[in-house]
Image: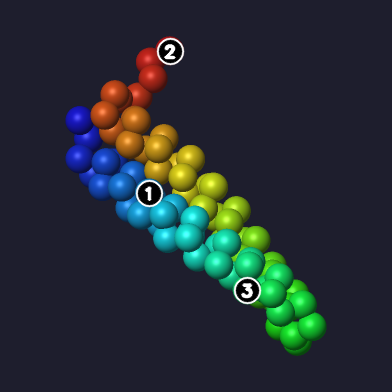
Amino acid sequence: MNKELLKKGVKKIIYFIFCSFSGPIFFYQALKNREHFFYYPVLSFGLIIMVLAIFFGFIGIKLIIISLLGKKKN
């Protein structure tokens, strides 16, 4: 078991959890205030955070699995 890789994977999962909660909050707040000046910046920021959540989730799970099982041998 590679402990350094496991730490990196857990860190990415923590980023995933943070982004998966904050992204929809920003997105929802933007949709509630459609006539506000910052509608498009907040909406795009929320969408970017949600895409980052998906990215961090996949990378975190991949790193954890590699740290527990080892590299795939060809």
Q: Mark 2 packing: few (<14 Cα in 10 Å), some, or many (20+)?
A: few
Q: In the rendered structure, which amino acid carries the disc numbered 3?
A: Gln
The answer to which of 3 and 73 lies nearer the viewer is 3
The answer to whether residue 12 is above or below residue 2 is below
Residue type indicated by callout 2: Asn
Q: Quadrant of the C terminus?
A: top left
Label 3 Cα neighbours within 10 Å, binned few <14 / some 14-19 / many ≥20: some
Q: Which residue is drawn at 47% across and 49% down?
A: 56
Find out whether the residues at labels 2 and 1 contact each other: C-beta distance under 8 Å: no
69 up-or-down from 31: above or below: above
Q: Residue furthest right?
A: 35
Mark found first going from the N terminus, 1 or 3? 1
| Dot placed on the residue nearer the N-terminal end, 2 or 1 | 1
- Mark before the other along the chain sequence, 2 or 3: 3
Whether residue 63 sits left or right of residue 45 in the image: it is left
Of the residues shown, which amino acid type is indicated by label 1?
Ile
Q: Is mark 2 on a helix, strand or loop?
A: loop
Q: In this view, does 64 lie above or below 70?
A: below
| Residue position for label 3 | 29
Q: Which colour scheme is used?
A: rainbow
On screen, residue 65 versus residue 43, left or right, reads: left
Residue 33 or residue 68, whichever sits in front: 33
Secondary structure of residue under mark 1: helix
Residue on which disc 1 sits: 13
Mark toward the viewer: 1 or 3 = 3
The quadrant of the picture occupied by the N terminus is top left
Q: Name the residue under label 2.
A: 74
Q: Position of residue 63 (x, y in %)?
A: 37, 38
Which residue ends up furthest to the front in the rendered image?
32
Please report the residue visible at 63 percent of the width from the left and 73 percent of the height from the top: 29
SS type, badge 3:
helix
